[in-house]
Amino acid sequence: MISTRDLSQLPDVDGLRRTLQSMAMLDAILCPEWQYRYYSFNAAWTAGEQMGSMRNGSGDDFFAHFSTAGCWLNGFAHEYPLSLYRDDGTKRVWPGILDTVPDEFASSLREPAFDVENVTFCIWRRHTDRVWQVGPVPFPPDHPDPDGSEYLLSPLDGRPETYRAWASDYYDREVESTAVRHVYHYQPLTAEVVGRLNCDLTLADLANDIAEIGYPGR
C-alpha cells in the first residue's frame, strides 16, 4: 500500500499526471454530474501548470499541483490522528508536514485553493528527484495510518484494476474492465469505449470534460 512511510509504488511525476487524468476521465464518463465526482483534473490550471484533485464529499481531499518544478501534493483526512480536529484541542498543522517543502513549490503553499491550513500529509517530487519526498514528521504511536495517506494515496498506484474495483463499489454498477484499461493506457477515447462505460453518453457529450482534463479524445 502507498503511504508517506512507503511511496515506492507511487508513479513518477508524469506517471501520476496520467493516472489522475485517467481517473478524472473515467469519473466524468461514469458520473456526468461534476459535483458528485471523486476525481477531477484541470490541464490548464494556470499557464504551464496543472492540478489534479480528489474530494470524497465527507471532508477528505487531496490536491496535486503539477508545475515546471515537478509535483507537490497535499492531503487532508479529517478523522485521522494528524487532523487539525484531533482530540487534544489544538488546531495547527502537525509538525514536520510542511517544514521542509522545497522553495520550488513555494507557490503551492501560497495557493488558497489548496487549503494548506487543513493538511494531514504533504509529499513532493521534483523532476530531478529519483523518489518522492516527505518531511520529517513525528508520527504518534499505535496507529496504522496516522496521517490518512494510505487511505488517500493507495488508489493512485496506476493499476486499472484498482480503479475498477473502487468505481464498481462507489458507483454501484458493473464497470467494464477492458474500457478502464483502455483509458488507463492513455489511448484515445472512442465512442465504443464511452458506450461500454456509460451507454447514456456520447463522445460529443464529453467534449468539455475532455478539454478540461486534457485527455486525448481523438
Image (tube, rainbow, N blue to C red):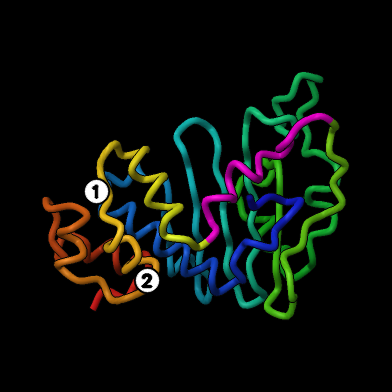
Q: Relative to residue 105, is residue 152 depicted above or below?
A: above
Q: CA distance from mark 2 to mark 1?
A: 17 Å
Residue 150 sits inside the magenta stretch: yes
Q: Residue sitting at 37 percent across and 71 percent down?
A: 214
- Res. 205 in view: yes
Q: Residue sitting at 75 percent across and 75 percent down?
A: 129
Q: Write down the quadrant of residue 151 in the picture.
A: top right
Q: Relative to residue 109, is residue 203 depicted above or below?
A: below
Q: Give how far across and how far down residue 35 sits, in percent.
A: 34, 41
Residue 132 sits inside the magenta stretch: no
The amino acid type, in three-letter code, at marker 1 is: Pro
| In-image side of 146 versus 56 (left or right) | right
Lower position in the chain sequence, tag 2 or tag 1 = 1
Q: Write down the quadrant of residue 61 in the picture.
A: top right
| In-image side of 123 versus 51 (left or right) | right
Q: Give how far across and how far down residue 33 sits, in percent.
A: 26, 44
Write down the residue under mark 1: 32
Look at the numbered disc 1 and give the secondary structure of its residue: loop
Q: Write down the quadrant of residue 8 in the picture.
A: bottom right
| In-image side of 25 versus 75 (left or right) | left
- Res. 35 in view: no
Quadrant in the picture for the C terminus: bottom left
The amino acid type, in three-letter code, at marker 2 is: Gly
Q: Residue sitting at 64 percent across and 27 percent down?
A: 79
Q: Relative to residue 92, is residue 161 depicted above or below?
A: below
Q: Give how far across and how far down residue 90 sits, in percent.
A: 80, 25
Q: Which residues are magenta?
A: 142-157
Write down the residue under mark 2: 214
Q: Give how far across and how far down residue 19 sits, in percent.
A: 47, 64
Look at the numbered disc 2 and give the secondary structure of its residue: loop
Q: Nearer the viewer, residue 88 or 174?
A: 174
